Image (tube, rainbow, N blue to C red):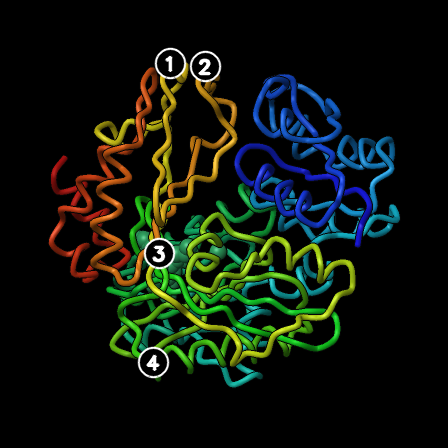
Amino acid sequence: MFRKVLVANRGEIAVRVMRACEELGVRTVAVYSEADKHTGHVRYADEAYNIGPARAADSYLDQEAVLEAAAKAGVDAIHPGYGFLAENAEFAQAVVDSGFVWVGPDPDAMEALGEKTNARALMQEADVPVVPGTTEPVSSVAEITAVADDYGYPVAIKAEGGGGGRGLKVVHSEDEVEAQFETAQREGEAYFDNSSVYVEKYLETPHHIEVQILADEHGNVRHLGERDCSLQRRHQKVIEEAPASILDDDLRAEIGDAAKRGVDAAGYTNAGTVEFLVENGEFYFMEVNTRIQVEHTVTEAITGLDIVKWQLRVAAGETLDFAQDDIEFDGHAIEFRINAENAAAEFEPATGTLETYDPAGGIGVRVDDAVRQGDEIGGDYDSMIAKLIVSASDRDECLTRSERALAEFDIEGIQTIIPFHRLMLTDEAFSNSEHTTKYLDEQLDQSR
Ligand SMILES: Nc1ncc2cc(-c3cccc4ccccc34)c(N3CC[C@@H](N)C3)nc2n1
Ligand SMILES: [Ca+2]
């Protein structure tokens, strides 16, 4: 096992990784920007290094600064968390070239799966159903209308370098194709430095289901069940849960096996998530996330596995000591992202001081955070200040316990979306888990 690990991140996920390190007897190194000097992940670490000013580009995204801190601290490995450099294959390679272990998949597997069309072709090879469309970038309007002729409108034009909902253009008819094609290419170039785009049949009312994968460096691949991430606001996940109520046991086994086959074909190692769209009892591969995700917690709640500890163990060359059949899924878990945002005003980020910060507790309640009472919340980074994860024996008990926990969670001095979450619990579609990915956008846009 490593002696010392640098966590190249901030906030709750940095503390999450450091807690896993503590339990493995590994010393922890934090990196921080000027703005984060007195924040939670710095307080928690054994050592901390300033890597630059508040702007992420000059600190958490500054590869040289992070590698310099790693060298100064003499660490054995670097864990990227999520966001920032977590899916940057070039950085992963630089970490390995600098003599540190990358706590994540091999850079070339990240590269291969990061190219969405490449990932689709690879999945098709492994007999994983993909959303109907092209497995190569398209270079003409004709190639786009050909997909629409085969599968009908609407179609989705997607940026090769995109993901997370950015770089997705929905085209409802032939006369929109040319304009949307050009816009998608231009935005791809601007946002992802990659103008390549591809086409898929657009599924109108899908559920967004993702499968958690763990693979070691000795050929063992396990799936840890699925999560339903369908409650999103403008592509931002707000509530995630496990298991997905819309899947029956057969579909659950099928989608889990497909995810394993796909990542196995890619020679994938460490933790990853295979994203699917599910509609009318059919599932279709969409993309792979080559990192630990915010919502990994609901999977931990129902399997009892510590995914981050396994990331560290696998990166250190250990073998997964459980078979697929040893993994049990017990109960139901829901994660509520506690964002400092004003839900009544388009979820715009809020700033302020945590005059009161009194998290929920009690049976079946987990709070992952890196803040304490009195902390200043600025606008430099992502607005999520905590995650409330509630687990219980079934979804109904989980909903009741969630209402109790959200009522207990007391934050004063800054606006959060806790009231929004409490409102969601009263929503008919949500409590019957009938909501699809567009439900929230439709509800909120109508009420505007
Ligand atoms: N062919 C096809 N059909 C329907 C889709 C539906 C989604 C989707 C998934 C989850 C939430 C959404 C909210 C608004 C619009 C789309 C979604 C989607 N994406 C792409 C990135 C991922 N984070 C969301 N891709 C789709 N692709
Ligand atoms: Ca994604």
Judged left or right of residue 338, residue 271 is: right
Of callouts 1 and 4, the N-terminal one: 4
Question: The residue tagged with tag 4: helix, strand or loop?
Answer: helix
Q: Earlier in the sequence, mark 3 or mark 1?
A: 3
Q: Can residue 235 be seen in this view?
A: no
How much space separates mark 2 and mark 1, taking CA atoms?
A: 6 Å
The kind of residue on which mark 3 rests is Ala
Q: Name the residue under label 2.
A: 374
Q: Which of marks 2 and 4 is nearer the N terminus?
A: 4
Can you tell me whether the CB of the residue at mark 4 lies under 8 Å from the nearest atom of ligand 1?
no
Q: Classify residue 337 as left or right of residue 185.
A: left
| Proximity of marks 2 and 1: CB atoms separated by less than 8 Å | yes
Badge 1 amino acid = Glu
Secondary structure under badge 2?
Answer: loop
Q: Does dot 1 land on a helix, a strand or a loop?
A: loop
Quarter location, residue 314 = bottom right
Give the mark, 4 or 3, whose residue is nearer the N terminus: 4
Residues packed near mark 4 inside 10 Å, few (<14), some (14 to 19) or many (20 plus): few
Cα separation, mark 1 vs mark 4, equals 46 Å
Classed neighbour count for the residue bearing mark 3: other residues with Cα under 10 Å, few (<14), some (14–19), many (≥20): many
Assign the C terminus to one quadrant of the image. top left
Q: Which quarter is ligand 1 in?
A: bottom left
Circle nearer the N terminus (2, 1)? 1
Q: Which mark is residue 328?
A: none
